[in-house]
Image: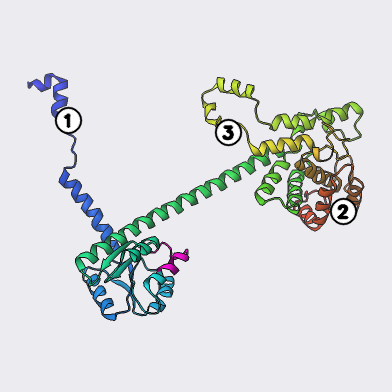
C-alpha cells in the first residue's frame, strides 16, 4: 500500500487541485478585448465636421473612414453649424476656428450658453492658434486640438480618446439616472407604506369609536383643502393630510361604556372622553430620552432605529391630537389655549372635524345639511374657530362638498 493511502493528510495534499490564477498574459488579453470592444463601439459615433474649406472636410472624413468610422454629418457653411448640432446631436464636433461670417469661437460661445449642447465634445482644427485663442477655446469647453495640415497620426488618437471619454461619461450619466430612479421608486414605496400605516392606525381609533366609516379620511382631506387655500406648500399639505387622520387616535384609551354611550354624557363621562386628546398625544409623540435609554438597553436590534429619534409626521400628529379640541377664545380643552397659541394645524383640524361631525349621522344625532352646518360654524367664528381658517374653509366649500360626496359613508346619505 502506498504511503499516501495510509496518511489521510498526505492523500489530501496529493489529490487537491492547485488553484489556477490567470497569468499576466491572459489578463492582458482580457484587458485588450475590453478596450477593443469599447473602441469598436465608438466607430458608429456620429461625428460632425465643420470647416469652411470643403477640401479639408473631405480629407478629415477620408482619414476617419479609413479608420473605420461610418457616421458623419458635414458642412462647410458655419452659419448652419449650431442648428446641425442641435438637430443631429453629434457625439463629437470637429470644428475649424478661422471661418467667415460665424467663427469657431462664435459657435463655441453659442454651445456654451445652450444646456443641451454644453457637454458636446469639441476637437478644434486649426492651422495657427495663438495662446489667447487657445485659452478661450479651453474656457469654452474644448476637449482637444489638432493642427493643420491634418496628420492622421495626430487626428485619429485624439478622436478616439475624446469619443471614449464621452462614452464613459454617458455611462456614468445613465448609471446616475438609474440610481435616481431607484431612489425615487423607493421613496414612493416608503411614502405609500407610511400612508398605509397611518390609515391602519387611524382606522383602529375609528372602529373603537362608532365605526364612522370614512371620517378620518374626510377630516384629513378637509385639512388639506384648508392648507392649500392658506398657501401652504404641497409637501406640507401632504403631511398635514396624513397627520390629521390621527386626530382621534386617543379614543383607543377611552372605555367602551363611555365611548359607545348613545345618549348625552354626564359630567364624569365628559371628563373621561375629553382625555382622548392627551391620550392621543401620548400614543403618537416620540419617546423621551429616558424611554430611549431603556429601549436601547433591551435589545441590540433597536440600535438600528436610533439614528432617527423622532418623526416629523408623528410630532405633527401629536400636536393635532392634543389641540384639535382647543377653542379660539380659550374655552376649549385639554390645555385651554387661546388664539394663535393654538398650533395652526390644531386650528385647521378643529374646523374640519366639527364640519364632519355636523354633516355626518352619529348614534346621538342626525346629519345636518350643508347650509345648516355652515350656519352653525359661522356662529362659532372667533369663539370656537380661528376666523382666518374658517374663511379659508368657506372659500373652498365646493371642494369640501366634493370630498364629502367622494368619501361618503355607504350607509349614509347627504341631506
Give the total number of marks visible in the rendering.
3
| Residue 107 at x, y percent in the picture | 41, 71
User: Which residue is identified by label 1?
Assistant: 16
Which residue is nearer to you in this view: 369 or 353?
353
Marking on residue 235: none
Within 10 angstroms of label 2, few (less than 14), some, or many (20 or more) residues?
A: some
Q: Earlier in the sequence, mark 2 or mark 1?
A: 1
Q: Name the secondary structure under disc 3.
A: loop
Q: Decide: marks 1, 3 in contact (CB < 8 A)? A: no
Question: CA separation, marks 2 and 3?
Answer: 44 Å
Q: Which residues are magenta?
A: 108-122
User: Which residue is identified by label 2?
Assistant: 370
According to the image, what is the colour scheme of the structure? Answer: rainbow
| Residue 284 at x, y percent in the picture | 69, 33
Image quadrant in which the N terminus is located? top left
Q: Name the secondary structure under disc 1.
A: loop
Q: Looking at the image, which residue is at 47% across and 65% down?
A: 113
Question: On screen, 415 above or below 332?
Answer: below
Amino acid at each position: 500500500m502506498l504511503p499516501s493511502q495510509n496518511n489521510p493528510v498526505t492523500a489530501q495534499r496529493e489529490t487537491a487541485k492547485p488553484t489556477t490564477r490567470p497569468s499576466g498574459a491572459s489578463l492582458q488579453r482580457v484587458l485588450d478585448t475590453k478596450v477593443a470592444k469599447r473602441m469598436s463601439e465608438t466607430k458608429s459615433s456620429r461625428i460632425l465636421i465643420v470647416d469652411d474649406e470643403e477640401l479639408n472636410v473631405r480629407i478629415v472624413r477620408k482619414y476617419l473612414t479609413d479608420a473605420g468610422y461610418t457616421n458623419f454629418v458635414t458642412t462647410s457653411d458655419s452659419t448652419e453649424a449650431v442648428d446641425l448640432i442641435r438637430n443631429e446631436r453629434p457625439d463629437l464636433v470637429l470644428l475649424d476656428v478661422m471661418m467667415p461670417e460665424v467663427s469657431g469661437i462664435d459657435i463655441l460661445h453659442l454651445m456654451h450658453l445652450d444646456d443641451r449642447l454644453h457637454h458636446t465634445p469639441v476637437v478644434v482644427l486649426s492651422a495657427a492658434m495663438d495662446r489667447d485663442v487657445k485659452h478661450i477655446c479651453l474656457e469654452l469647453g474644448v476637449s482637444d486640438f489638432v493642427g493643420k495640415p491634418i496628420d492622421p497620426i495626430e487626428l485619429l488618437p485624439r478622436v478616439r480618446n475624446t469619443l471614449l471619454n464621452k462614452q464613459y461619461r454617458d455611462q456614468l450619466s445613465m448609471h446616475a439616472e438609474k440610481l435616481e430612479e431607484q431612489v425615487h421608486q423607493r421613496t414612493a414605496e416608503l411614502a405609500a407604506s407610511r400612508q398605509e400605516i397611518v390609515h391602519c392606525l387611524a382606522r383602529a381609533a375609528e372602529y373603537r369609536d362608532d365605526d364612522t366609516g370614512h371620517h378620518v379620511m374626510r377630516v384629513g382631506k378637509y385639512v388639506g383643502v384648508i392648507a392649500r387655500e392658506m398657501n401652504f406648500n404641497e409637501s406640507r399639505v401632504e403631511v398635514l393630510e396624513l397627520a390629521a387622520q390621527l386626530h382621534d387616535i386617543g379614543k383607543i384609551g377611552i372605555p367602551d361604556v363611555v365611548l359607545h354611550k348613545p345618549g348625552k354624557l354626564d359630567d364624569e363621562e365628559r371628563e373621561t372622553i375629553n382625555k382622548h386628546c392627551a391620550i392621543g398625544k401620548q400614543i403618537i409623540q416620540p419617546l423621551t430620552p429616558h424611554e430611549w435609554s431603556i429601549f436601547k438597553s433591551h435589545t441590540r436590534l433597536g440600535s438600528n432605529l436610533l439614528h432617527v429619534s423622532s418623526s416629523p409626521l408623528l410630532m405633527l400628529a401629536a400636536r393635532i391630537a392634543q389641540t384639535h379640541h382647543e377653542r379660539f377664545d380659550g374655552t376649549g380643552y385639554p390645555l385651554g389655549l387661546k388664539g394663535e397659541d393654538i398650533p395652526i394645524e390644531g386650528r385647521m383640524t378643529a374646523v374640519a372635524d366639527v364640519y364632519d361631525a355636523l354633516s355626518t349621522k352619529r348614534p346621538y344625532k342626525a346629519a345636518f345639511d350643508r347650509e345648516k352646518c355652515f350656519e352653525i360654524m359661522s356662529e362659532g367664528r372667533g369663539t370656537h374657530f380661528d376666523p382666518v381658517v374658517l374663511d379659508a374653509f368657506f372659500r373652498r366649500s365646493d371642494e369640501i362638498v366634493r370630498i364629502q360626496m367622494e368619501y361618503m359613508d355607504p350607509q349614509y346619505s347627504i341631506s
